[in-house]
Structures are given as C-alpha cells and as structure tokens.
Image (tube, helix red, strand yellow):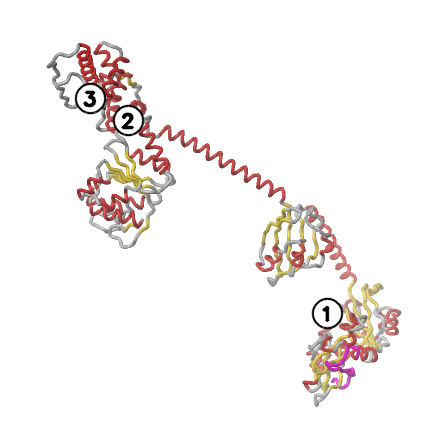
C-alpha cells in the first residue's frame, strides 16, 4: 500500500562529515531529519539527526567544524518495505521516523510520524475499521478534512459533540458546521489555531485547528480536535480547586513551626515552605530551586547526609545538624513512593532545636545534680537505717580498727577469713562486709558447715540433679553456690568441713565452677566467699586435718575478731542494745542500773557476745522489777573455781608496807567477789573513786608481773 503514497527523500551523511554538511542539507531542502551511514556496514543507515538537536549550537563558530560522530544522533530506526500492508503501518504507528526500503533492500526514502498518521486516517481500504476504532478510542472529537473542507474521517465523539449523524456529517463541509474563517486561515496560511470557542444552537465546543502537510510542506488538509465546553469547564473547575488547594497548603506550611523542603528522587529542591529558620541558610533559598542539595555540602550551605540516607535506606531518617553560625537543626527526612513502590519525592522537615539542645543540656546537668543529691540522701538514709538496724555495736578502739579494715576491703570481691572465739559475732561482721560491698543487692547465703551432716554437705553446697540419689527431690536442687550466684556465700565453721569436701571447695575457689551431684555439666558461679572459724586452722594444717592449699585460698584477707573480754568498753553498749531489743520483743520496760552495767563490764564473758545476749534476754524475761541491780545478775554468771593462797607474815616488816599489802589483798578479793567498784567500795566502807584508783594500781602491778599482797 505504501507504493500508492509519497515517500520523503532521505538525505545522508557519514560519520566523517562535518556539522556544517548536516546543516547545509537541512537548510537547502527544508529537512527536519538527516540520516547517517556507516562505511563499516556497507553504507547502511545507522542513525539520524534532528534539526532541533543542532539548533542550540548554531551560534558557536567552532561547532560547524565538528565531525558528525561528535553531534547528538539517534540510533532507534525502524526499516519498512514499500509494499507493506496497512496493518504494517499500525505496527510502526508512533515511531518518529521509518526508513523505506525496496525489495532489494535499497534505500528509497523515509516517512515521519505525521505521514504515517495521515495515511492511516485517509486510507479507504478494507481496514478502515481499524482507523475508526482508533479514533473512537480517543475521548475527544476528531475530524479530518481535505483542503476544500470535505470531511474524510471523524470519530464517534465528534458526532456526539456536534449532534449530527454520520451521513449528515459526510454531506456537509467543515465551514458549514464549524467556523469557515478559521478553517480558511489554517489551510491558506498553514497556521494552527488553538482554543477556539464555538457556540451555536447545536454545540458548545473548544476547537483546535491544525494543518496537514504533504512531503513538500504544502497544506493538503486540516485536523480539528474538539472538546466539550462542559468538560473544559470541569477541567477548569478542577484546576481552580487544585489552585485553591495549593493556596491552602502553602498557608498550612507557612503556619507550621517546621521548615519544609520538597525534593525529587535525586535530591533536587522543587519547593519549600515560607517559614525560614533564621541564620541557618547562608544564601537565598530561591537560588536553590532546581539544584541538587547533595552538591551543596562542600560549600557548607547544607548538610546532605539526610538526603543520602533517605535515598539509600528508603525510610524515615532523623539527624541533627549544626550550622557554621551555631544553629542546631533537627532534620527529619520522609520518602514518598509512587504506586509501584518507586521513590518519587523526599520531604524534609527542618526544626530549630538550638534552644531545645541548650535546655536539654541544662536539664541533663540538673538531672546529674539531682541524681547526685538523691544518692547522697539515699546514702544518708541508708546510714541512718543501718545505724538503727545494725547489729554491730561498739565503742572500743579494737573494733574501730577492725571496722576501718573492713571498710577498706569491702569494695573488693576477694575471699575473707574471719577468725575469733565462739560467740564473738563473726556472722555479724560477715554481713557488715556484705552490706558495705558491691554485692549488697545480691543474695547473702549462710551455710553452717558444722550443722549439716557430712553425707549431705556436698549436695547442699553444690546441688544435685533429679534422681541423683535415693530420697532426692524429684526436680533436683540448685545448691548454696548457685543460690548465692553474683552474691556472697558465708561458710561458717569452715574448720568442720571434712577433707574430701575440702578438695572440691578448693576447686570451686580456683576454677569458679561446680558440678552438681549426679550431673555431668559444669556450671559457672560468681560468688564471693566469706569463711569463718573459731579453730586454729594453722594448727589443723600442721596436724593434717585441714588442707594447706585450701587454707591459703581462704586466708586471702584475714580478719581477727577480738573476744569481748579484751574490749570491756563495748559491753555496756551491747548490753543496752540487747536490752532495748528484748524490751520491744517482750513488751517490757526493764532498765539496767549502773552497778549492773559495772558488773557486766567486769565479767570475762567466756561465751562472748552470744553469752551476753542470752544473759540480757534471761534478765528481761525473768525480772520481777523494772530496774535490774547487780545482785540480780550475779547468780546468772559463771563462778569459776578460785584458789586463794593463804597469806601470812613470816617476818617482821614495816607497818606501812604491811598495811599496803593487806589493802591490796582486800581490794582484790572484793573485786573478784563483787565484780564492780561500787559494790566493792560499799563492802569495804570507802568511796568508789578510792577503790577505782587503787584497783587500777593493782592491775598495773599484775601486768608488770609484780606480786600483790603479802609475799609468801
């Protein structure tokens, strides 16, 4: 079918030709396209150049000397046989240019997009239905007319808009139905007339008139595109709505505290809100419209990290930026995706948080000070509560030195060995170390190694798995070591531990791990060991009843607790503490007289604090009167067997010396019997201060090894 229609001449150049050659062809032949052949492909057309591609470079004198290969050219060329059917025209419909070849494959010319469209619209073959379908698919009225105004083709929308039948339309000319003057202007002058309003009794339309030209540029007809005025009105209303919506949006953005930036998917600034952050932008933002913000980072104008992060991560990103002027700005970037999930826009909200950052820093400082004061208050409250509830009561210099030593070692998790006589309060000192140490919020587990049968001690210490032995708990037992994990394990009476368990305890201290009875898996434990004993472990090591290596493992930090008899000044305080404790427990108001306190202070307390506690409790429970005197206490104290050497004079001595010897002996006897200076003074008929002074002199002589009383 193409043989019945015109074909445009295809003017060619080679890649070695100059730009001037291309422009000369376009100028002389009024051609929009020049084709490029390749000598390496036997002169075949491989590309084409548009006149619009080279027009911007015409003012450059050096441009005309450029080779064609340096010019912008296009390689998307479709080749077409001249004998092609109308169906083949549909296949290439929409291509910009189509190169026409003869049967031998030789070049005959080319067709452009308008040529193909015109052929399809004016073709009267059996395939006109295709054209009709094409026209009817366009939602606008289309009329094709020749130069005389005869209507050659039309769409169904044109019939509807003009309110005519197909036969009526074919029988009339364009000038009769539409505007004759406009039609003549188009076909005679070759000018397009757009947005021409036509209103009459039949129709109200908006018409666009355009000329149709042949290959020589001569006008051969016209194409008229019609749009309903109601449709146009609807579009105008929609545009007005969008315009108003845009105005509202601008107003909303301007009222928002944040500054809003809208970027495309590559980071180019499209628009921004009217609210500007003072002293943040160093240039006028209007100059940034159309620029890629990621290219401004090297100038210090904008920090592009937020843009890069949104593009890369494709999710909401927040960063804080500081400008050279000291402004702190919070930038929040949000990606906007199209319906296919492709990044389409980036919206960045900028907020000046300079004052917020300053307030945050001030708040942080205030919070730190508050935390400091809170800790100090809690420390004071804990000290007050500890002082109220503590069991460790003392006034002696010996215990003061022990406490200073404990405070020094309490901050570590080293193993501690407490030694001292039975009843001196080793558990109280162990709890003091625990409460002053870093593990005070973790468990404190006490184990009396002497109170647990030897056969059960291992399972109690290390735990056991279910079914480990007959009578075992069906679900197993964790053991004291695991119960004390992260805390403190107090091993009281560690000297009573059998040798076979001493080996396993040594392994725990070395490896910090246990194996439960009946188990095979190793369990790691983090436990601080505080051991206590009233035995001489060094002597037991010599006798072979205590392992030497375990002794050195336990004796990392030794603490010796002095007996109560070596610190008599603590006795009144401890006595009064127990008195208050038992008064509250038994709802009594018992008091101790000074003579009673003196008697308690003078007693050697072989059972130490435990014995003193028992005596005070017995006194509170059994006392008939509220005031406890010395004579109430004396029957409760152990009276050791005393052997007094019969003193007699066997030679003459000065009376003064004999008087002094007798006085020393009487005072010593009275103090041994009545225990207090007040009772001894009462029995001897002298003042308490006299007895106190003379008894101190007697004690000094005894410490020096001198004999008191008469010499035997």
List x then y, in percent, for residue 283: 72, 52
Rendered view: 424 above or below 236: above
Report the predominant secondary structure element of the magenta stretch.
Answer: loop
Reading the image, the residue beneath label 2 is 567
Give the number of the disc on residue 706. Answer: 3
Tell me where residue 208 sits by quadrant. bottom right
Read off the magenta span.
1-20
Per the model, the C-alpha gap separating discs 2 and 1 is 114 Å
Q: Residue at x 37, y 28 (%)?
A: 388
Label 2 neighbour load within 10 Å: few <14, some 14-19, many 20+ = some
Between disc 2 and disc 1, whose residue precedes? 1
Mark 3 secondary-structure assignment = loop
Reading the image, the residue beneath label 1 is 138
Rendered view: 606 above or below 509: above
Foreground label between 1 and 3 = 3
Whether the magenta-drawn stretch holds residue 10 is answered as yes
Between disc 3 and disc 2, whose residue precedes? 2
Whether the magenta-drawn stretch holds residue 609 is answered as no
Label 3 neighbour load within 10 Å: few <14, some 14-19, many 20+ = few
Per the model, the C-alpha gap separating discs 3 and 2 is 24 Å
């Amino acid at each position: 079918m193409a043989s019945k229609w015109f074909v445009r001449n295809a003017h060619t150049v080679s890649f070695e030709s100059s730009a001037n050659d291309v422009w000369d062809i376009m100028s002389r032949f009024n051609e929009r396209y020049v084709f490029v052949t390749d000598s390496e492909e036997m002169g075949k057309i491989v590309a084409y150049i548009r006149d619009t591609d080279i027009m911007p470079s015409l003012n450059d004198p050096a441009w005309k000397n450029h080779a064609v290969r340096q010019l912008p050219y296009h390689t998307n060329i479709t080749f077409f046989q001249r004998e092609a059917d109308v169906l083949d025209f549909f296949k290439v419909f929409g291509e910009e240019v189509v190169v026409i070849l003869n049967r031998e494959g030789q070049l005959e010319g080319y067709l452009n997009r308008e040529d193909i469209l015109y052929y399809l619209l004016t073709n009267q073959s059996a395939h006109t239905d295709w054209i009709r379908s094409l026209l009817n698919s366009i939602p606008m009225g289309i009329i094709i007319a020749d130069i005389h105004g005869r209507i050659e083709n039309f769409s169904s929308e044109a019939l509807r808009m003009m309110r005519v039948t197909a036969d009526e339309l074919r029988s009339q000319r364009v000038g009769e139905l539409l505007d004759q003057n406009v039609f003549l202007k188009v076909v005679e002058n070759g000018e397009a007339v757009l947005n021409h309003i036509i209103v009459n009794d039949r129709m109200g339309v908006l018409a666009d008139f355009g000329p149709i030209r042949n290959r020589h540029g001569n006008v051969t007809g016209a194409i008229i595109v019609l749009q309903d005025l109601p449709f146009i009105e609807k579009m105008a209303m929609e545009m007005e709505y969008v315009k108003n919506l845009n105005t509202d949006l601008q107003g909303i953005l301007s009222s928002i505290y944040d500054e809003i930036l809208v970027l495309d998917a590559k980071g180019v600034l499209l628009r921004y809100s009217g609210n500007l952050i003072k002293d943040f932008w160093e240039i006028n933002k209007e100059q940034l419209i159309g620029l890629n913000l990621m290219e401004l980072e090297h100038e210090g104008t904008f920090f592009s990290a937020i843009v890069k992060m949104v593009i890369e991560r494709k999710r909401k990103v927040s960063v804080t930026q500081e400008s050279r002027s000291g402004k702190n700005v919070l930038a929040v970037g949000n990606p906007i995706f199209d319906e296919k999930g492709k990044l389409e826009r980036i919206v960045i909200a900028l907020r000046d948080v300079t004052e917020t950052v300053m307030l945050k820093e001030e708040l942080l400082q205030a919070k730190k000070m508050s935390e400091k004061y809170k800790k100090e208050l809690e420390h004071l409250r804990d000290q007050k509560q500890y002082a109220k509830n503590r069991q460790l009561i003392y006034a002696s210099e010996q215990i003061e030195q022990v406490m200073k030593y404990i405070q020094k070692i309490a901050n570590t998790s080293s193993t501690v060995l407490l030694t001292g006589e039975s009843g001196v309060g080793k558990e109280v000192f162990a709890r003091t170390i625990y409460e002053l140490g870093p593990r005070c919020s973790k468990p404190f587990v006490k184990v009396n190694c002497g109170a647990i049968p030897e056969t059960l001690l291992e399972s109690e210490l290390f735990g056991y798995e279910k079914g480990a032995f007959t009578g075992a708990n069906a679900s197993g037992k964790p053991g004291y070591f695991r119960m004390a994990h992260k805390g403190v394990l107090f091993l009281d009476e560690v000297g009573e531990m059998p040798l076979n368990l001493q080996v396993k305890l040594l392994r725990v201290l070395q490896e910090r791990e246990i194996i439960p009875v009946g188990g095979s898996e190793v369990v790691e434990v983090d436990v601080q060991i505080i051991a206590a004993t009233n035995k001489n472990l060094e002597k037991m090591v010599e006798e072979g009843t205590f392992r030497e290596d375990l002794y050195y493992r336990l004796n990392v930090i030794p603490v010796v607790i002095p007996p109560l008899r070596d610190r008599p000044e603590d006795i009144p305080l401890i006595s009064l503490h127990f008195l208050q404790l038992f008064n509250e427990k038994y709802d009594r108001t018992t008091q101790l007289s000074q003579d009673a306190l003196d008697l308690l202070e003078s007693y050697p307390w072989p059972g130490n604090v435990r014995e003193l506690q028992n005596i005070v409790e017995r006194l509170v429970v059994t006392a008939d009167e509220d005031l406890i005197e010395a004579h109430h206490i004396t029957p409760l104290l152990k009276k050791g067997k005393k052997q007094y050497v019969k003193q007699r004079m066997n030679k003459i001595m000065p009376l003064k010396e004999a008087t002094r010897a007798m006085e020393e002996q009487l005072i010593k006897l009275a103090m041994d019997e009545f225990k207090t200076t007040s009772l001894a003074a009462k029995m001897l008929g002298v003042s308490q201060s006299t007895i106190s002074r003379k008894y101190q002199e007697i004690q000094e002589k005894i410490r020096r090894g001198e004999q008191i009383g008469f010499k035997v």
